[in-house]
Image: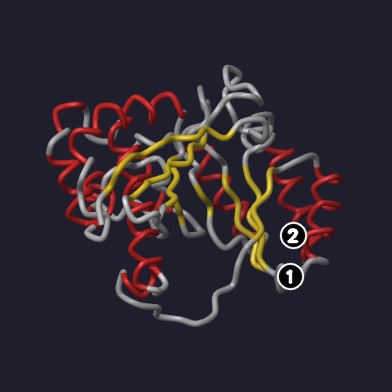
C-alpha cells in the first residue's frame, strides 16, 4: 500500500462565540480536516486545530516526502516528515499539519488491521470513563438553565469556561461559579477554565491565586489555564500555592515543549 495524495478541508460557519479575539469571526476557519488517500482505496482522516490555508500550504511542502510512502508505518512516516522540515519552524504550521497526517495514518492502520487504534497504540487501561460536558460561561441565570438542560442528558461532570470570567470583575466571577455549583449540585464534578490564552488576557498571578482560593470554596475539581500560556514562572508559583489543582498545556506543541513544564511541576493536570 502506498500514499497517493493528501487533501485538507477547513471547517467553517460554526466557530463558537465567546473566548476569541475580536479578529476571529464566525466564518473563519480554526479547524481543518486532513484526508490521506492510498492506492488500495483505503482513506484515513485526521484533523488539526489550525487554519486550512496553513495546512494546504504545508501539504504542498510535504508532498515530495509523503508520496509513495507506506501508510501502515505511521510513526516512521511522521518522523520522516518532522526530521526533514525542522528548519521550517518546529511547533508551527508544518508541525500542526503533520499531526493531522499522523492521525489519518493511524486511522488507515486501524482500518486495515481491523483493530481499534487505541489497541494499536498500546491498549486500554480502563473500560469506562466519566465524560464531562464543556460549555462556555454565561451570566449566572442562563448558565444555570444551560447546566440543568445538560444534566438532564445524564452528565455528572461539567467544565465551564471563558465567557465573562476574569474579564469583568471578581464579584461576577464568584457569582457565576456559585450559580453553577447550585445548578449541578454538590455531588457533580465542576471544573473552571479561565481561558487565559485569549488575546490580551489582562489578569496575572494575584488574580489567579485569589480566584483559586474562591474556587476551593465551591468544590471545584481543577482550575484550567488561569495564566497566559508562556508564563512558566508564575504557573510554578501558582501551582505551589493554589488551593485547587492547576491544569494547562493546551497550547504547547511538540512533546519536547512539555519538558520544562513537567520538570518544574507547573501543572497538576496536563
Give the side of residue 139 with respect to residue 189, left or right: right
Nearest to the observer: residue 27 or residue 152: 27
Quadrant in the rendering for residue 93: top left
**Which residue lies at the image location 76% right of the left edge and 40% below the top edge?**
138
Residues marked 2 and 1 touching at CB (< 8 Å): yes
**Which residue lies at the image location 80% right of the left edge and 47% below the top edge?**
143
Q: Which label belongs to residue 181? A: 2
Q: Where is residue 110 in the image (x, y as percent from the top left)?
A: 38, 67
For the N terminus, give its image quadrant.
bottom left
Q: In this picture, is 70 found above or below 87?
A: below
Look at the numbered disc 1 and give the secondary structure of its residue. Answer: loop
**Which residue lies at the image location 23% right of the left edge and 40% below the top edge?**
67
Nearest to the observer: residue 219 or residue 54: 54
**Which residue lies at the image location 40% right of the left edge and 53% below the top edge?**
239
Q: Position of residue 65 (x, y in %)?
A: 18, 38
Q: In this picture, is 21 found above or below 102?
A: above
Which residue lies under the disc numbered 1?
Answer: 186
What is the C-alpha distance between the residues marked 2 and 1? Answer: 7 Å
Quadrant in the rendering for residue 70: bottom left
Q: Where is residue 94 in the image (x, y as percent from the top left)?
A: 28, 32
Q: Position of residue 158 (x, y in %)?
A: 66, 60
For the C terminus, give its image quadrant.
bottom left
Alpha-carbon neighbours of circle 1 within 10 Å: few (<14), some, or many (≥20)? few
Amino acid at each position: 500500500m502506498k500514499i497517493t495524495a493528501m487533501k485538507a478541508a477547513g471547517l467553517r460557519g460554526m466557530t463558537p462565540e465567546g473566548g476569541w479575539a475580536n479578529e476571529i469571526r464566525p466564518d473563519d476557519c480554526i479547524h481543518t480536516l486532513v484526508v490521506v488517500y492510498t492506492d488500495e482505496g483505503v482513506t484515513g482522516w485526521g484533523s488539526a486545530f489550525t487554519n486550512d490555508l496553513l495546512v494546504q500550504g504545508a501539504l504542498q511542502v510535504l508532498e515530495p516526502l509523503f508520496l509513495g510512502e507506506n501508510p501502515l508505518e505511521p510513526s516512521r512516516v511522521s518522523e520522516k516528515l518532522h526530521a526533514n522540515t525542522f528548519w521550517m519552524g518546529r511547533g508551527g504550521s508544518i508541525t500542526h499539519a503533520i499531526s493531522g497526517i499522523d492521525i489519518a495514518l493511524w486511522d488507515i492502520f486501524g482500518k486495515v488491521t481491523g483493530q481499534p487504534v487505541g489497541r494499536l497504540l498500546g491498549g486500554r487501561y480502563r473500560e469506562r470513563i466519566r465524560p464531562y460536558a464543556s460549555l462556555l460561561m454565561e451570566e449566572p441565570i442562563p448558565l444555570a438553565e444551560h447546566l440543568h438542560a445538560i444534566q438532564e442528558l445524564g452528565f455528572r461532570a461539567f467544565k465551564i469556561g471563558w465567557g465573562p470570567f476574569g474579564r469583568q470583575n471578581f464579584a461576577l466571577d464568584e457569582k457565576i461559579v456559585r450559580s453553577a455549583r447550585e445548578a449541578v449540585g454538590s455531588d457533580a464534578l465542576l471544573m473552571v477554565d479561565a481561558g487565559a490564552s485569549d488575546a490580551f488576557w489582562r489578569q496575572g498571578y494575584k488574580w489567579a491565586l485569589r480566584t483559586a482560593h474562591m474556587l476551593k470554596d465551591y468544590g471545584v475539581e481543577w482550575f484550567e489555564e488561569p495564566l497566559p500560556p508562556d508564563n512558566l514562572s508564575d504557573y510554578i508559583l501558582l501551582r505551589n500555592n493554589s488551593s485547587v489543582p492547576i491544569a494547562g498545556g493546551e497550547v504547547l506543541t511538540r512533546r519536547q515543549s512539555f519538558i520544562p513544564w513537567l520538570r518544574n511541576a507547573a501543572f497538576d493536570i496536563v
